[in-house]
Amino acid sequence: MKIKLWCKPRWYFLAHKTQILILILIISNYSFQVTASNDLINKNPEKSLSYHSSLFSAGKNDLTLRDAVNLALHHNPELAAFAKEKDALEGTTQQAGLFKNPELSVNVENVGNIQKLTGDINSPQAVSQEVVQQITTIRISQLFELGGKRAARTAAALLNEELANKDYETRRIEIIARVANVYTDVLAGQERLKLAEGSMQLAQNVVNTVIKRVQAGKVPPIEETRAKIGLSTTRIELEQAQRDLVAARKRLALLWGDPSPQFNQALGNLESVTPLPSVEKLEERVLGSPAALRALKNIEQRKALLEVEKTRRIPNLIVNAGVVHHAQLGGNTAVAGLAIPLPLFDRNQGNLKEAHQRVNKAMDEKAATELRLKTELAQAYEVLSAVWNEINILRDEILPGARSAFEVTKKGYELGRFGFLELLDSQRILFQNQVLYVRALANYQRLVNEIERLIAAPIDELSDMSSTRHSGDNEEYKE
């Protein structure tokens, strides 16, 4: 329900031509604003992300993890899409702070009855003619938002923009972790290829040794056949390692939109492992990650939306003013009015209830996010501890024993103390444990990447055991 108050003073202040001139000026001003807005849009085209990397210039064809991360951050389309969303929400914030436009209305009653009164103006004919005369009303209305609606709306839009920034940071960290994982696959593939080449060379040496013993008549010719079969098996393993490395290199290059890798090799040392910090330190950092802060910011944004709904309980004020032109009398009359809705039935109850519940939902989502992050951290930490122990056992106990056993068995076979099956078995055990060691190192790095994604920081910054790093680690894997 609306109450409209109209007043029509009996004084005249404008001519009919002046009304038309005002109308033309208003329309011309509106057209100029539209043209100016279009010019601003045309002068500010969308900026595209560009990154001119000198990675492959001057003969530098080796890739580092830092180079791979930079390439992905500047060329990954997913991250570019999040950046565009941030720019779009800046426009939403700008729009939320604008005032409402005034409205121009023109109303014509009794169209065509514009003849001047003649004769006795008090005669019944003149009076009836005056009653049905053409009346033109030009009115401008302006809506005034009361209760701080515009400020509340702008604050909510700003918080929504901050949420987009947190989403951008979260996706950026996820892309860095993804690059680090694929980069680890490339490093592991390179090591796996080296092991396959070394295993093939060992198999070739075994074949040469067996051939000599067969030619000397010390062993039957069937052992030469077995040795060549073992050599063929290592050749298959070498080809498989080459295919796996090619696939990992392509996956890495595709992260920055390159269908074919342009680098020779990935630089890094899988054995550069960092001992684990305490789980308490990690839990402290995980609550400060962009994902956790995003959940906290979401509560603030929902509370801001609640404030917006509270301001909507207060009705807005509409003020209008204009002139009425009487065609037959030739005069103008000023008119003014106020309009305000009466909040009898709709007091925005439903939207307020929804906003309250969404605040509570955001609080529950924050608790769920923190629980999920802590759970993922605990799982990764436990697995990482187990892999760390596996690496130490393989490096300090199993691999030295496997190498020693193979060398002893090889020399013993040359002297006739061991059979061919013992030689093949020692060679197989050595190769398998070398592969297990590389796999454990790669798993360790992937778990480190996962923890770093959760805490949004390098894990070695939190390590309180960095001084106990393995003495052979002369090259940092994490840059």
Image (tube, helix red, strand yellow):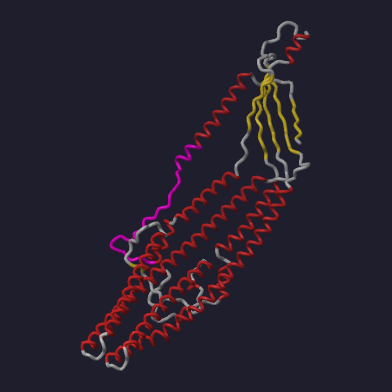
Q: Which residue shows up at 35% across the image and 67% down it?
A: 243
Q: Identify the residue at horizontal 45%, vertical 84% (top origin).
A: 393
Residue 217 placement (x, y as % from top left): 22, 90
- The quarter of the picture where residue 264 lies is bottom left
Q: Whole-percent x and y of residue 69? A: 42, 63
Q: Could one spot residue 178 in this view of the protein?
A: yes
Task: Name the residue: 69% across, 35% down.
Answer: 318
Badge count? 0
Can you give x and y, in whole percent of width and height, for residue 340 in the image? 73, 37
- Magenta part of the protein: which range? 37-64
The quadrant of the rendering that contains the N terminus is: top right
Vertical placement of residue 140 versus 250, above or below: above
Q: Which image quadrant: the C terminus?
A: bottom left
Please tell me whether residue 63 is drawn above or below residue 330 in the rendered image. below
Q: Could you say which is closer to the camera, residue 53 or residue 234?
A: 234
Q: Is residue 51 magenta?
A: yes
Is residue 331 something one can see in this rendering?
no
Closer to the camera in the image, 186 or 267: 186
- Left or right of residue 466, residue 123 in this image: right
The answer to which image quadrant residue 187 occupies is bottom left
Q: Tell me the residue at 74%/24% (across/down).
A: 8
Judged left or right of residue 261, residue 115 is right
